[in-house]
Amino acid sequence: MGSWLSKQLEPTSAHFTYLVLSGFLLAYALFSDFIRNRLHLSEPPLATLVGILFGPDVLGVIDPASWGWSDSITQEATRIVVSLQVFSVGVELPKAYFSRHWRSVGILLVPVMTYGWIVTAAFVYAIMKTQWATALIISACLTPTDPVLAAAVLQGSRFSGRVPRRLRHMLSAESGCNDGTSFPFLYAALLIFMGKSTGGIIKEWVLATILWQCALGLLIGLILGHFANRTLRVAEKRGWIDPSAFLSFYLLLAVLSVGVGASLGLDDFLVAFGAGTGFAWDGWFANKTKETHLPNILDLLLNSSMFAYFGAIIPWSQFVPRDVTPDITIWRLIVLLVLILLFRRLPIILLLKPLIPDIRTYREALFCGHFGPMGLGGLFLVIEARAQLETGESIPLPHPPEHHPYKKQIEIVWPIVCFILLGSTFVHGCSVAGISVASHFQRHKDERAPLLAAEDEGLGGMVHEGGGGESEPSVSGDEDVSLPKTQSSP
């Protein structure tokens, strides 16, 4: 009997993975309101913790390496997940958002990102004793704000309602754009690393990266999204499309934009973001689907699964000195993480606060300076960096080669970036709980909510506007109707 039963069972790693992931997501779904609005925790850190616990270094249930998964599969999985998220950001923004808020987002994308790239590279260079060009490559992978982590905090929770809408929209727009705008930083670093002449670097960077990948990618995305919007309007008006296909159109358009961008060698993320922005520029699709909560469904299914996968592939054995990377130690990585979290964004946003129209108080500047999570976008970029170092193209080898002229650089970028992404996932994913608890105790005793951190009033030191209406006025925060047009109390 026992022999017969053992033949029927198929307890493979992949099958256990289906069991663990679905069980985690079902448990989270059952208690999602309690977890998000009482404990103030989001999916990414919890999913990452599940991946770590059930991964090959602890329980050994989720082991992607045993499935034959490689760098190329990780690259494509993160490409799809991040592209879907940036597409979703473009759709969810208020109609014609960038026509009114281009200055705020532009400052976050150019001077803030440039500052973060240089400062982070300086920390990597000094602490990890890398070459300056290698430090620039690592820093470029850590420059963008992750749209998946941002969405987990800025959408669909009690805490998000305490943050002025203009800040939520600005940070969402930044996270949607800067995964794409990080490509110029990465390719500039790679060109410097390859030792090309200054003229050659500038020529290739401007023509191949700025004009072809980024500018053309964004333009094609906007055109694709606008054309899809008009096509869907006609189909819906004439009754050619049923409700289920209506929602499917959203996902299929996002995947189509990825296919177009990847096939043409464009910036996938800017194509996807441009397609989402062009698709929802007039607000029609967002109004038609606002009750479906489709982005939240994507967060729960795709994004959480990807963070669990990230938890399972964290290279713990590479966080200690090895022959090829003798300067990597756990304490250096921790110091590097702390310095990056403190200085990558905060100082420059505080300095530029008077120039950013959507940041009105220094408390808001502190919040925006802190809230720059690094996640799946960085995971994609580090695979892209390794691919360029390994093959000179965007297609990586299945695994890092044993012998290569850039062996040390290929080996050092992966553990450093993974450690910083891991730290950011937990720090930024759990910081909402810290902010909520601190806000609770800052209030007078008679003003505190009966439950710890259960307040729903606007965060103190921030300007919360009034207003109403379906369409966004000149400032996106003016849509908030639940808060008085004053600075709220702490």
Image (cartoon, helix red, strand yellow):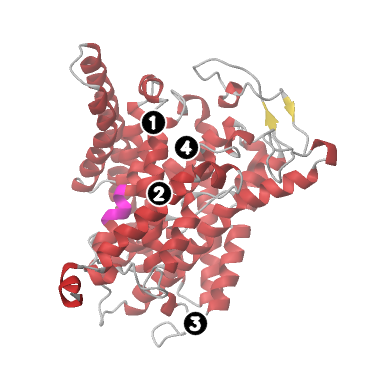
Q: Which amino acid does label 2 sit on?
A: Leu
x, y percent for residue 437: 70, 49
Q: Name the residue under label 1.
A: 91
Query: For the residues marked 3 and 4, what is the alpha-carbon distance in whole angstroms?
Result: 37 Å
Question: Which comes sooner in the sequence, label 2 or label 4?
Answer: 2
Disc 2 element: helix
Residue holding disc 3: 327
Q: Which of the two labelled residues, at mark 1 and mark 4, occupies the earlier sequence position? A: 1
- The magenta span reads 76-80
> Of the residues tagged 1 and 4, which is closer to the observer?
1
Distance, label 3 to label 1, CA atoms, is 44 Å
Cα–Cα gap, marks 1 and 2: 27 Å
Disc 1, SS: helix
Question: Which secondary structure lies at badge 4?
Answer: helix
Nearest the eye: 334 or 361: 334
Q: Quadrant of the C terminus?
A: top right
Q: Earlier in the sequence, mark 1 or mark 2?
A: 2
Residue 214 spot, x, y in % from top left? 33, 43
Q: Is the C-beta separation of discs 1 and 4 under 8 Å?
A: no
Q: Mark 2 points at which residue?
A: 26
Q: For mark 4, what is the residue?
A: 173
- Location of residue 115 with respect to 249 vertically, above or below: below
Q: Residues within 10 Å of mark 4 (few under 14, many from 20)?
A: many
Q: Which of marks 3 and 1 is nearer the N terminus?
A: 1
**Label 2 vs label 4, nearer the camera:** 2
Vertical arrangement, residue 366 with respect to residue 275, above or below:
below
- Residue 51 place in picture, x, y as percent: 41, 63
Give the CA distance from mark 2 to mark 4. Answer: 30 Å
Q: Residue at x 38, y 29 (%)?
A: 292
